[in-house]
Image (spheres, helix red, strand yellow):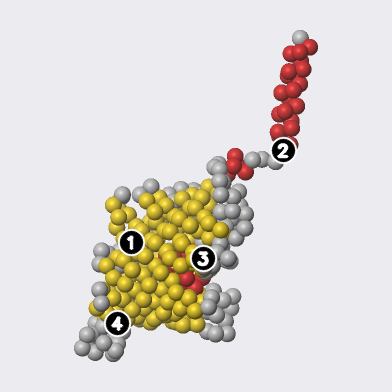
């Protein structure tokens, strides 16, 4: 009987000790954190059940290459390989090679940013699109910033290149991206595209895509280690990527295209022990130490 009482006392003592001990983060967050990157980090891969969506590769202390994929079910739909070039610490050129967004045409975008030397902000961006060696489109984007140095508007005008007059551009098509913020996070991106008949001056079509991000948490956005200038460059092609500039993670995203019904995506996150997401319910994230 005495031994039985000692046994129960031991069990109670262990229970009291464990209740006072600090909780295991893996138990709290629901997964293991094998890499345990305690210092600065950069996103490495974004995956879903179909395959790899994004792959970020640094070289010599800078982001060097990004691969992007989309899928329809398990079938590959789009693929872009993005190569970055630098002058000092600034991005001097980006090449985006692969299929165009939303289509199967293969081509090559060449993006050349222009900076304000005082602030280091991108003030404009020249974008030329080629199919093979044929120059198809020429675009210029102009950027506006708020007092906190955040981009709030991008105005892009695009001209089809006439082989007979390859250096003379008439800009019938425009895209205006308006970005609003909620504290340090992107709350809304409104991307409006106008197509103009250059002979009559009549607007042939207008499409507005709206991305709304609501109920941000306090934890770290997976893209914190990616520079805003890279994001602004690539968002000139993929406007939803402006949201990558946020510090935190939204609970849901609402997407509306023209008069079509709104589509709502609700996220369900799991985080590592440093409060970076490893999953948002549909995508998983892996990381690498930030390049030095």
The residue at the point 28 percent across, 76 percent down is: 130
Crowd band around label 2 with a 10 angstrom C-alpha radius: few (<14), some (14–19), many (20+) = few
Q: What whole-number distance in Å separates the C-alpha atoms at marks 3 and 4?
A: 30 Å
**Residue underneath mark 1:** 79
Closer mark to the observer between disc 3 and disc 4: 3
Residue bearing mark 4: 159
Secondary structure of the residue carrying numbered label 4: strand
Towards the viewer: 183 or 60: 60
Mark 1, Cα crowd under 10 Å, few <14 / some 14-19 / many 20+, is many
Q: Is residue 60 above or below residue 203?
A: above
Query: Which one is in front in this view, the residue at disc 2 or the one at disc 1?
Result: 1
Mark 1: secondary structure: strand
Helix, strand or loop status at disc 2? loop
Label 4 crowd bin: few (<14), some (14–19), many (20+), radius 10 Å: some
| Disc 2: which residue | 21
Residue 264 to residue 201: above or below: above
Which label sits on residue 226?
A: 3
Q: Nearer the viewer, mark 4 or mark 1?
A: 1
Residue 87, image x and y in percent?
49, 79
Earlier in the chain: of badge 3 and badge 2, it is 2
Q: Is residue 277 visible?
A: yes
Q: How many angstroms separate mark 3 from mark 2 (CA)?
A: 37 Å
The residue sitting at 30% across, 55% down in the picture is 76
Kindly report the distance in space between the C-alpha atoms of the residues bearing marks 2 and 4: 65 Å
Q: Could you tell whether 103 is left or right of 190 in the image?
A: left
Residue lying at the far right of the rendered structure: 2
Q: In 3D space, how far apart are the residues under numbered discs 2 and 1 (Cα atoms)?
A: 49 Å
The alpha-carbon separation of the residues under discs 4 and 1 comes to 24 Å
| Mark before the other along the chain sequence, 2 or 1 | 2
Please state the horizontal and vertical placement of residue 119, each as a whole percent of the image: 57, 82
Q: Quadrant of the N terminus?
A: top right
Depth order, front residue of 235/291: 291
């Amino acid at each position: 009987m005495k031994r039985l009482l000692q046994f129960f006392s031991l069990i109670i003592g262990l229970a009291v000790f464990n209740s006072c001990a600090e909780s295991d983060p893996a138990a709290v967050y629901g997964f293991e954190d094998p890499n345990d990157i305690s210092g600065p980090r950069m996103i490495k891969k974004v995956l879903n059940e179909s395959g790899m969506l994004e792959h970020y590769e640094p070289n010599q202390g800078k982001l060097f290459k990004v691969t992007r994929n989309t899928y329809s079910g398990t079938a590959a739909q789009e693929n872009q390989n993005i190569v970055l070039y630098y002058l000092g610490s600034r991005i001097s050129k980006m090449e985006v090679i692969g299929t165009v967004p939303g289509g199967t045409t293969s081509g090559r975008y060449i993006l050349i940013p222009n900076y304000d030397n005082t602030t280091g902000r991108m003030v404009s961006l020249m974008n030329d699109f080629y199919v093979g060696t044929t120059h198809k489109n020429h675009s210029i984007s102009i950027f506006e910033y708020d007092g906190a140095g955040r981009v709030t508007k991008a105005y892009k005008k695009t001209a089809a290149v006439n082989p007979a007059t390859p250096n003379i551009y008439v800009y019938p098509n425009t895209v205006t991206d308006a970005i609003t913020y909620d504290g340090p996070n992107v709350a809304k991106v409104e991307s409006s595209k106008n197509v103009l008949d250059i002979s009559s001056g009549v607007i042939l079509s207008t499409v507005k895509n709206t991305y709304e991000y609501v109920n941000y948490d306090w934890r770290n956005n997976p893209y914190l280690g990616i520079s805003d200038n890279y994001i602004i460059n690539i968002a000139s092609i993929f406007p939803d990527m402006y949201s990558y500039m946020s510090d935190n993670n939204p609970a849901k995203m609402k997407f509306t295209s023209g008069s079509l019904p709104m589509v709502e995506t609700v996220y369900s996150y799991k985080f590592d022990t440093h409060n970076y997401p490893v999953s948002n319910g549909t995508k998983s994230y892996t990381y690498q130490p930030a390049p030095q």
